[in-house]
């Protein structure tokens, strides 16, 4: 799914499920991306296997993996439900950060 398709889908679902607070602003609040990347979409400590030397040996749980805009994995990890150590490390090590205000506004209605 490319950036414009995802943005339209988020906006349609936001309106469908009664989102009105940011009805006119949401399209401009959502992050923009100019590339799609193959995204795991559920990277979390529970899905990362490591050996005794803390070397990553595998990534589990690929059923949500798909092509998404390059900000999607970051947005998934930084969602409010994951606040804490994991999101702190992601924020420190991410190659880029995005403004997630639009994603978080939509999440309050959609999830």
Image (cartoon, rainbow, N blue to C red):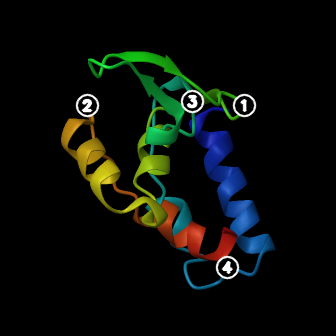
> Can you tell which quarter of the image residue 55 is in?
top left
Badge 2 or badge 4: first in the primary sequence? 4
How crowded pointer 4 is (Cα within 10 Å; few <14, some 14-19, many 20+) is rated as some
Checking the image for residue 95, the label placed there is 2
Q: Nearer the viewer, residue 58 or 5?
A: 58
Tell me whether circle 2 and circle 4 mark residues in contact (CB < 8 Å): no
Image-based side of 90 in relation to 57, left or right: left
Q: Position of residue 13 (x, y in %)?
A: 75, 63
Image-based side of 40 in relation to 77, left or right: right
Badge 4 or badge 1: first in the primary sequence? 4
> Can you tell which quarter of the image residue 29 is in?
bottom left
Which residue, given by chain and number where applicable, does mark 1 sit on? 63
Which residue, given by chain and number where applicable, does mark 3 sit on? 40
Look at the numbered disc 1 and give the secondary structure of its residue: loop
Q: Position of residue 37 (x, y in %)?
A: 52, 23
Q: Position of residue 36 (x, y in %)?
A: 53, 26
Badge 3 or badge 4: first in the primary sequence? 4
Residue visible at 49% across and 37% down in the picture: 43
Please name which of the two marks, 2 or 1, marks the residue nearer to the observer: 1
- Asked whether residue 44 appears in the rendered view, the answer is no
How crowded pointer 2 is (Cα within 10 Å; few <14, some 14-19, many 20+) is rated as few
Q: Label 3, label 1: how many angstroms apart (C-alpha)?
A: 8 Å
Badge 2 or badge 3: first in the primary sequence? 3
The extreme right residue here reads 16
Which residue, given by chain and number where applicable, does mark 4 sit on? 19
């Amino acid at each position: 799914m490319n950036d414009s398709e995802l943005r339209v889908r988020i906006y349609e679902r936001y309106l469908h499920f009664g989102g009105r607070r940011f009805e006119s602003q949401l399209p401009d609040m959502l992050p923009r991306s100019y590339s799609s990347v193959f995204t795991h979409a559920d990277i979390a400590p529970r899905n990362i296997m490591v050996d005794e030397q803390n070397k990553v040996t595998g990534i589990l749980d690929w059923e949500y993996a798909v092509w998404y805009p390059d900000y999607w994995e970051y947005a998934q990890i930084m969602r409010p439900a994951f606040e804490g150590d994991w999101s702190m490390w992601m924020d420190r090590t991410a190659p880029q950060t995005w403004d997630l205000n639009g994603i978080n506004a939509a999440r309050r209605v959609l999830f």
